[in-house]
Image: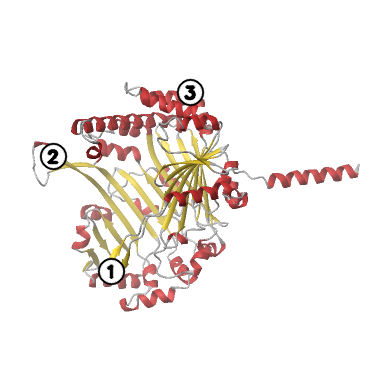
Amino acid sequence: MSIRFHHLILAVFFAGTLTSCKNNAPEETRLIPSNALAVVTIDPNALAEKLQNGGISIDSVISKIFEKDTAAAKDRKSVDEFRKNAGFDWTRPIHYFVVRKQAPDRTNISIMTVLASLSDTSKFLRFIRSGEHTGNNKIVRENLFSYTEQGPGNIIAWDQHHIISMFYQHPVKPYYDTAKMKFIIPERPDYSKEMLSEVVKLFSQKDKESMRSVKGFSEMYKTRAEGYLFSTTDNLTGSFPFLPLQLPKLEEMVKGNHTAATLAFEDGKIIMNAVTHINKPLGNILKKYAGPTVPISLTDHYPSQNINGIVLASFNPEIFGGLLKQLEIEGLVNEFMKKSEISSQDFYESMKGDIAIVVSDLGMANTEPQYRDDELFLVKQRPTGKMIMNIPVGNKESFRKLMNKAAAMGTVYKEGNNYKGSDLIRTLGFYLQANEQQLILASDSITCQQYLQGTAKANISEEVKAHFKGKSTAFYFNIANTIGGFIKDSTSNYYHSLLTAKNTVKDIRGSSDNFSDGKIKAVVELRMQNEKQNSLVTLTSLFADIAVDARQVAKKEKELEEKMFPSGIPAVIRAN
C-alpha cells in the first residue's frame, strides 16, 4: 500500500513538472527570432468567435463594405478568393514582428515580417500561380522552403505549414570623400541576397534560438486574449549608432527588460493590460528613487468645460542623478556643463517631479485667407485649441540659476518676480510664464491668466479622477468630443467615417503604477458609446464605413486621373 502511495506521489510530481515546463507560445513562433524587438499577435479565430457571439459574421461585414459600390464585383471576388481558396489557416494566430540590426557600415537594417499558417499548400500554390498575385515573379524552391520576390525589399516564403512575408529595409549611408571633396552615395545593397539570408535563418533556426525559448514571451500566452504584444530592450543599444561614446553600463541597464501585454475585447471597451519586467540594475534605481503619485489637483482650475485630453506624470527628480551615477558619466556631464555655471544637479533639482498637461477646445475655426486668389479661397479654416502645461518648481535656487541663464540667452525675460517667454517662444505659438512656484507653458496669455487665478472649475468627471488616483502616470483623451470639434462643417471625403467614429468610440484612458516587485503594471482602456455590446461587434460598423469611404476616395482619384491622363497617353507620362 505504501509503495503504491509512493508511486502516486512521484506520478503527481512528474505531471506537475511537465505542466510547469509547458511552452504556452504557439508552435509557429519558432520562426520568430529571439532578437526581435517587438512581436504583435492577433488571434483571428478568437475574434471570429466574438463576432459570432454578437450575431455578426465576417461575410456580413465584407458585404457591407462592397454594398455601396456596384462596380466592386471583381474586388469582392478577389477578397473571397483570398479568404476561402488561398490555403490559409484562419484558426491559427497571425504574428507581426520587427528585427533591427546594425550593418558593418553602422547603418540600421529594419526587417518587418508577417507570419501566418497554411492549411493547404496546394491551394496556396494555385492561388499565387494564378498570375494576378505574382505577375512574372518566379517561384524558387530551397531545401526548407519555397519563395518568390514581390519587388525590392519584399519576399514571400513558405514551407508545408507556415508562410512569411518579409519587408526588408537597408538604407545607404552617404559619406564625405575628402580626396574628391564631395559626398558619395554608395550603391544600394543587394536586397535579394540579404533578404534570402534572413529567410534561411528563420526557417532553419532551432527552438532555443526562437522567441519560444524566451520565458516572458511564452508565459504571456497563458492568458487567453484576442491579441498579444511583446517587446524587449535586449538589442536596443545597437539601434543608436549616433551615441558619441560607448556606455558599457547602458547595455547592462537595458538588457533583460521586457513588456508583455494582452488585448481583450469586452462589453463596452477594449482593455490592454501590460506588465513591464525590469532587470536588477535598473530595478534597484527605480526602487531607490521611488516616485509619488500623479498631481490630479493641478487640473482642477483649468478654465474650460470642453476638455479634450489630460496627461499627468509624477517622478522623483533624483532618479536622473541616480542614472548618471549608474552610467558613470555624471562627472563627464558636469565637466561639459562647467562653462555654463550650471550642473546636471541644477537641472533635475529645479523640478518638483510633477507634470500636468491639459488640452481643450480643439476644433477648426474660419479665418481670413492671406491671399485671395478667387472666390473659392475667401474662407479658410485652421486648427484651434487651448493648452496648459504646468511644471511645479522644486529647489528654488537651482530654478533661479536656470531661468537667469535662459534670460541671459534671450529665451526669456524677467518682469518683477516672473519670467516670461521672449519673442522666440511667442513665434512658436506658446506663452510662457514662470515664478518660484511653477513654470507654465500655455497656448495663449488669456488661458494662462485664467488658470493662475484659480477660480475656474474644470469639467473632469469624478470617474476619470478616480482612475488617475494613486498612479505614477496617467492620460485621458475624449475621442468623441475631439472628432465632433473637427468635423463641424467638414467637407472631408471621410466625413461619414468620422461621424460613425464619433457615435461609436467614447474615449481612451490609461495609467501605470510605480515600480513594485520587479515590474511596472499598466492598463489602457478604449471605451465605446454602447456599454452593453461587445466592443469588437461595435467596431465592425466603423471598420466597414472606413473601408467604404476609402474605396470611394480611390474611385474618385482614379476617375480624376483618367480625365487628366486618358488611356492613350503613354504610361511613362501617366506614372509621372
Q: Earlier in the sequence, mark 1 or mark 3?
A: 3
CA gap, disc 2 and disc 3 = 47 Å
Q: Which residue is mark 1?
A: 180
Discs 2, 3 touching: Cβ within 8 Å? no
User: Which is in the foreground here, disc 1 or disc 3?
Assistant: 1
SS for dot 1: loop
User: Which is in the foreground here, disc 1 or disc 2?
Assistant: 1
The circle on residue 379 is 2
- On the image, the x and y values in percent for residue 105 come to 41, 63
In depth, the one of 570 and 326 nearer the eye is 570
Q: Amino acid at mark 2?
A: Val
Camera sees residue 26: no
Discs 1, 3 touching: Cβ within 8 Å? no
Q: Quadrant of residue 573?
A: top left
CA gap, disc 1 and disc 3 = 70 Å
SS for dot 3: loop
Q: Earlier in the sequence, mark 1 or mark 2?
A: 1
* Image position of 219 with respect to 131: above or below: below
Identify the residue at image location x=34%, y=73%.
397
Q: Which residue is mark 3?
A: 55
- On the image, the x and y values in percent for residue 380 come to 16, 41
